[in-house]
Every structure is written in C-alpha cells, then in structure tokens.
Amino acid sequence: MDLIERTRLFVTGVLEGEPSTHDMSHIERVERTCIKIYEKEGGDLHTLRLAALLHDVGIVKEHKEGGNHAEYSAEIAREFLEQNGADQELVDHVVSCILSHRFSRGIQAESIEAKILQDADRIDALGAVGIFRSLVSMGALRALKQTIGTVKETSMNAYTEDPFDGFYDYMERKPFRIPERLNTKTAKEIAEQRLAIMRTYLEQLKEETS
C-alpha cells in the first residue's frame, strides 16, 4: 500500500463518527478539487494529495479541547508522515500547507500547493454542498455546546436564538467573501459558478421566510 492510501486509511479511522462537516466526505471532495485545480495550475501532486487528506485530521481534538484544528492537524500529520518513512522535505512541505489552509486564520499561503489547498478547502464551503455543510455544521456545533460545553469562538453565529439569523450572518461573513481570498484563476472560476447557486437559494429562502 502506497503512502497516499495509508494516509487515507489513517484519516478515515481518525474521523470515523465525526459529527461536523469536517468528515471524510469533505476530505475527499477537497482532494478531488485539489487535483482539478492542479491540472491547470501545476504544483507537486503527491504533496498536494497528502496535505488534502491530512488537513482536518485534528478536528476531533479541537472538538474536545478547543483551540485550532489546523495546528493540531499539522502536528498529527508530521508524526504520521515521519512514522511512515516520508522524507523531511516532504513532511515540512505538507505541514506548511496544512498550517495555512484555514479560512478564519487569514494566513497567506506561500507555495503553489498551499495556495491550491486553501482554494479547494474554501470552495467546499460554496454551492449546494456549501449550503448543506453550513446547516449541518450549525446543528453539530449547537449539539456539542449542549452535550460537552464546547463553543467554537470563530463560529458564534451557530449559537443564535433564531437559527435563520445565524445562517444569514454566516452567509454574509464567509461564502460571499471567499472569492476575494482565493489564490488561483481556476478556483475563482469554480467559485463563481457555485456562488450563483447560493444567490438563488438565498433569494428563495428570504422570500419564504419574510
């Protein structure tokens, strides 16, 4: 079994039962989008796929302890890759990509691989999937607050008394700001197509709830 598939198996095990939208389906969508962007923008595909597979592996620890899952993911990725014989240059590159991927931290990506990972992760918050993920995530965050008391400070709109208010606030703060924070031309083209779906949905939602 090659390193990519060992990594996939490892992450699948860690994220089994993950209640939020940082689950294995998200991981593999990001991986596919990374490949799609790579085909036009270039980079090192091996590094990119490893970074995509490992970029959210620390989310379980964040749910339990708070903190920043990008930092946890980078720590876990480093340990896993070193234990599985990856050379130090590859390990450092993957870790660098993971540390810069998170939207709310606003960290500038340096390498083309880091830029593509940022873009692919952000694109997964757009379109029909983006709407679905935002609603599932809000429900999961509200449930985690009720059950174990964890509050995600970067997602306070999940806890509003009226969930519609929280959803509208989220939409204003994140999806429609994403295009201006994308790195590649390919990602911007994909994003615009997905935002058209979100605009139509919001117009209909506002009409039905007004």
Image (cartoon, grey):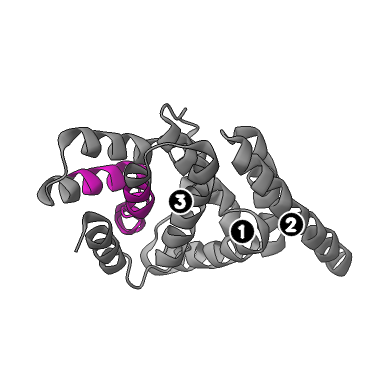
Q: Nearer the viewer, residue 125 or 174?
A: 125
Q: Which contiguous range is marked in magenta?
A: 49-78
Q: Quadrant of the N terminus?
A: bottom left
Q: What amino acid is at disc 1?
A: Gly
Q: Is residue 65 magenta?
A: yes
First reached walking from the N terminus: tag 2 or tag 1: 1
Which disc, if any, is residue 198? 2
**Crowd around label 2: few <14 · some 14–19 · many ≥20 (10 Å):** many
Q: What amino acid is at disc 3?
A: Lys
- Give the main secondary structure of the magenta stretch: helix
Q: Quadrant of the C terminus?
A: bottom right
Q: What amino acid is at disc 2?
A: Met
In the rendered image, which residue does mark 1 sit on? 130
Q: CA separation, marks 2 and 1?
A: 8 Å
**Crowd around label 3: few <14 · some 14–19 · many ≥20 (10 Å):** some
The residue depicted at 49 percent of the width and 62 percent of the height is 141
Q: Is residue 109 visible?
A: yes
Which disc, if any, is residue 152? 3
